[in-house]
Amino acid sequence: MNAAVASPLTNAPIKVLVADDERLVRSGFKVLLDLEDDITVVGEATNGAEAVERARATRPDVVLMDIRMPKLDGIQATAQIAGTRGLEQVRVLILTTYDTDEYVFDTLQAGASGFLLKDAGPAELLQAIRVIAAGDALLAPRITRRLIGQFTARRTAARDADERLAVLTEREREVLALVGQGLSNHEIGAKLFLSPATARTHVSRAMTKLGARDRAQLVVIAYRTGLVSPAT
């Protein structure tokens, strides 16, 4: 088992809610997560509507959310959680067997912070939970920036870069473009000759000015505005 890692808001373990309509899948995740010192499962949900209710009741740090569920699918449930007052700090990690452009775009648009395929290994899943809980965005290795870029380019005909990005400084635009390319704060700092802390500050300011929930939505904005293109 790993040494305990603090939740982003407290010194307690990372609280996880598991939402999947298959009992075996939920049980498997629970067994895996309960072995970790820094992660605790605070609830399970069998459909999207239940996931929203349990999120309100348990206030988890991370929701493991399946996409295809009855009553309310994972995309709709994610949107409801992201739009609920008091759940602003809840992060959603989408788990699915479906590797398609549309799901990537729609889940990020709904407010998800990460997207991981169900065939990922245990270590990859655990790392994803920790990354999401820390406030960063995560995409499965096979869900590349190219997929997001291609789908966004098809969905967005108008380029509203000048209007949407007018609130940013030139440096913040540079940082946003690098976030859109998938760079971490350390990589952004190295590229722009900034400290990681300064890079993080610019990212945080861009998020605030653009009304982005997290880095995942900054990626979407970078593509929607044309600041980053699929060929980048």
Image (cartoon, helix red, strand yellow):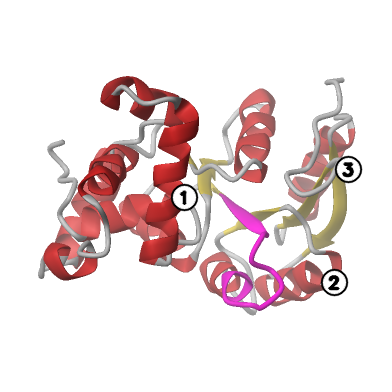
Q: Which residue is mark 1?
A: 204
Residue at the image point whose x is 50% and y is 32% from the top = 197
Q: Which residue is mark 2?
A: 57
- Left or right, 111 with reference to 227: right
- Mark 3 secondary-structure assignment: loop
Q: Does residue 157 appear in this view?
A: yes
Pair 2/3: label in front: 3
Q: Percent position (x, y) of residue 226? A: 15, 54
Residue at the image point whose x is 30% and y is 41% from the top = 175
Q: Amino acid at mark 2?
A: Ala
Q: Quadrant of the C terminus?
A: top left
How dense is the environment of label 3, judged by Cα within 10 Å: few (below 14), some, or many (20 and up)?
some
Which mark sits nearer the N-terminus, 3 or 1? Answer: 3
- Mark 2 secondary-structure assignment: helix
Q: Quadrant of the N terminus?
A: top right
Q: Which residues are magenta?
A: 80-94
Please check the rendered image and state whether residue 92 is part of the magenta-colored stretch, yes or no: yes
Q: Residue 166: name its quadrant.
A: bottom left
Q: Which mark is residue 12?
A: 3
Which mark sits nearer the N-terminus, 1 or 2? Answer: 2
Q: Nearer the viewer, residue 32 or 211?
A: 211
Q: Percent position (x, y) of residue 200? A: 47, 39
| Real-space Cα separation, disc 3 to disc 1, in angstroms | 24 Å
Q: Percent position (x, y) of residue 181? A: 28, 37
Against 215, residue 142 (above or below) is above
| Real-space Cα separation, disc 1 to disc 2, in angstroms | 28 Å
